Image (cartoon, rainbow, N blue to C red):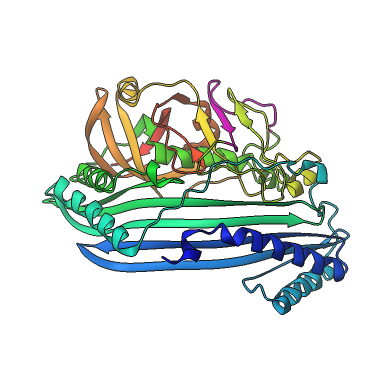
Amino acid sequence: MDKDITDIRGSEVELQSLVADILGEARRQGASGAEVSASADAGLSVTVRRGELETVEFNQDRGFGITLYFGQRKGSASTSDSSLPAIRETVQAAANIARHTQEDPCNGLADAELMPQTLPDLDLYHPWLLDPATAEAMALACEGAGFAEDGRVANSEGAQVSSQQSCRVYGNSHGFVGSYSATRHGISCVLIAEDENGMQRDYWYTAARDPAGLEKAEQVGAEAARRTAARLSPQKIKTGQFPVLFAPNMATGLMGHLLGALSGAAQYRKSSFLLDSLGSSVAADHLTLAEQPHLLNSIGSAAFDGDGVATSAKAFVERGTVTNYLLSTYSARKLNMQTTGNAGGVFNLTASGRTLPRDELLRTMGRGLYVTELMGQGVNGVTGDYSRGASGFWIEDGVIAYPVDEITIAGNLKDIYRDVQYLGDDLDMRGNIRAPSTLVGSMTLAGT
């Protein structure tokens, strides 16, 4: 990898200068306000399949998103070309759009006093000096460990090793310019196992800002194999009402539906099953959803949001009660409220509550479904109706009895969140929403 790819931080000063140039051009073209988001990305991704190199991908990209305000009219345009003529043309395009749109009293920059005064070092940049040959060797070791772990692993959809770097700069006509560089690395493996009853597919992956925080490649492959082989010879279950335990990577999605219902856009559009729920009890009285944007070396950390507003620690649901909506500057104005610094989403959102180790969760549920995969889009954000295809494991007498598939799990999210009995001690920290195993007391399972 060449120098440009191994250290994206060299782009930071250049992007800051380009952002300043774009803001200056916006002023020259008569904008009353402007904001610019600039990004540079670089990385390497190597994939192998069945012991052979399949792809080597280098990426190196940059882009600029420009938003202009003429009073309360707004126009946006983007470009990947940083030449002066391209910048002028893109600013002109945004200006033309703005001049032909209707005024919206909620348009405009966030208030200047909401921008961060200083930018903390969140320890997000940990480059990995990874060359294609090393990445290939790691991916081969990952896949090889999967085949060696269980003789029923018959095929592979590939193992991948990737290293990505990014630089983000945001600036606006208040004079605020914020920037940071970050890395994200990963190892993943997808395997197929087969027995006399057919084939099953599963995967595993690890992700971290710092390569030292990754699981070893061989561990990833072995875990993918164990998960895949465990799904062989699935059985059917009878329809009924049973407890459901969501695996951590499934629970993150479940918590995401709750956050979506509390988003400012869903609230002002009146398209939420938790409409006007601020201050109301909407979940089990032990469940808390809170974000910590300034955790060091964490996937979801950021000092400012997409509007340039300083991020801060806060709860959205505290012991079952809604304490905040997720508000950007625009959605906050639509609701006559104050932004929460969540333009673009949440930052290190963690679900916490009454906790048991996973094995105790299984014993507590006694008999029911442990969900490890969900399929379909059967979630109605307006009514809360929830119906999705699922597979996983049947729990009998508090232990895993056998794999199951072709199940539909159903309920209403308003009831599901109130019926969260316990959380596990196995927090999945690989994404921006971090959740552990989550036990729901009763859901409808449709089988045979």
Q: Height in image: 237 above or below 94?
A: above
Q: Height in image: 250 above or below 32?
A: above
Q: Which residues are magenta?
A: 277-294
Residue 167 vs residue 72, the one in the foreground = 167
Give residue 172's quadrant in the image: bottom right
Determine whether, in the image, residue 259 is placed left or right of residue 108.
left
Q: Which residue is pictured at 49% across the width and 51% down the height?
A: 183
Q: Which residue is pictured at 22% across the width and 47% down the height?
A: 225
Residue farthest toward the bottom in the current orientation of the protein? 85
Residue 400 vs residue 433, the one in the foreground = 433
Q: Is residue 223 magenta?
A: no
Q: Where is residue 12? Give x, y as percent.
A: 62, 58
Determine whether, in the image, residue 373 is placed left or right of residue 157.
right
Q: Where is residue 403? Give x, y as percent.
A: 23, 39
Residue 130 vs residue 193, the one in the foreground = 130
Q: Height in image: 273 above or below 167?
A: above
Q: Which residue is pictured at 50% across the width and 40% down the height?
A: 297
Residue 260 vs residue 175, the one in the foreground = 175
Residue 410 makes an appearance in the image: no
Q: How many marks?
A: 0
Q: Which residue is pictured at 19% across the width and 49% down the height?
A: 145
Q: Quadrant of the image for the N terminus?
A: bottom left
Residue 248 makes an appearance in the image: yes
Q: Where is residue 227? Give x, y as percent.
A: 25, 43
Q: Quadrant of the image for the C terminus?
A: top left
Q: Where is residue 380? Give x, y as percent.
A: 55, 46
For the stretch drawn in magenta, the main secondary structure is loop
